[in-house]
Amino acid sequence: MNDELFLNERIDVIATFGAGLHPCNPVKFRRPNGREVVIREIGLRHPSVKGARTVHVFDVTDGEADYRIELDSERLTWHLTREGDRLW
């Protein structure tokens, strides 16, 4: 991400869950201001440890901007942590 904003916004996410290599796939999310972002592509995804919790990190795009969203697997909450110019 280039020219990125670091955020900590709690977001609502619609995701699909299934089997296979990538059992969780976010489809779209709604920001606190009400704006909905439809995810067109998922790039990097990986688990990360924050303290004693595992957070699943997803770099996604809507075709206009790139976003990093995170799922806290203990609290079952989603956060938007970064927003940047379209890079890939």
Image: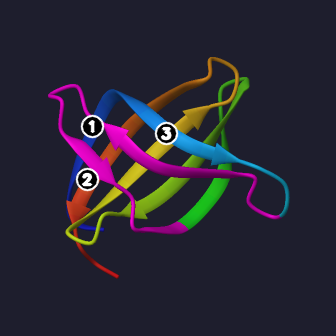
Please tell me whether mark 3 or mark 2 is closer to you in this view. 3
The x, y position of residue 67, in whole percent, is 34, 55
Look at mark 3 in the image and give the residue it sits on. Answer: 14
The residue lying toward the viewer, choosing from 26 and 83, is 26
Left of 2 or right of it: where is 52? right
Residue occupying image coordinates x 74% and y 60% = 22
In the image, residue 4 sits, relative to residue 12, either above or below, namely: below
The x, y position of residue 24, in whole percent, is 67, 49
The Cα atoms of the two marked residues, 1 and 2, are separated by 8 Å
The x, y position of residue 31, in whole percent, is 26, 33
Look at mark 1 in the image and give the residue it sits on. Answer: 7
- Contact (CB < 8 A) between labels 1 and 2? yes
Q: How dense is the environment of label 3, judged by Cα within 10 Å: few (below 14), some, or many (20 and up)?
A: few
- Contact (CB < 8 A) between labels 3 and 2? no
Q: Which residues are magenta?
A: 21-43
Left of 27 or right of it: where is 11? left
Q: State the image quarter where residue 11 is shown.
A: top left
Look at mark 2 in the image and give the residue it sits on. Answer: 83
- Amino acid type, residue under disc 3 in the picture: Ile
- Contact (CB < 8 A) between labels 1 and 3? no
Mark 1 falls on what kind of element? Answer: strand
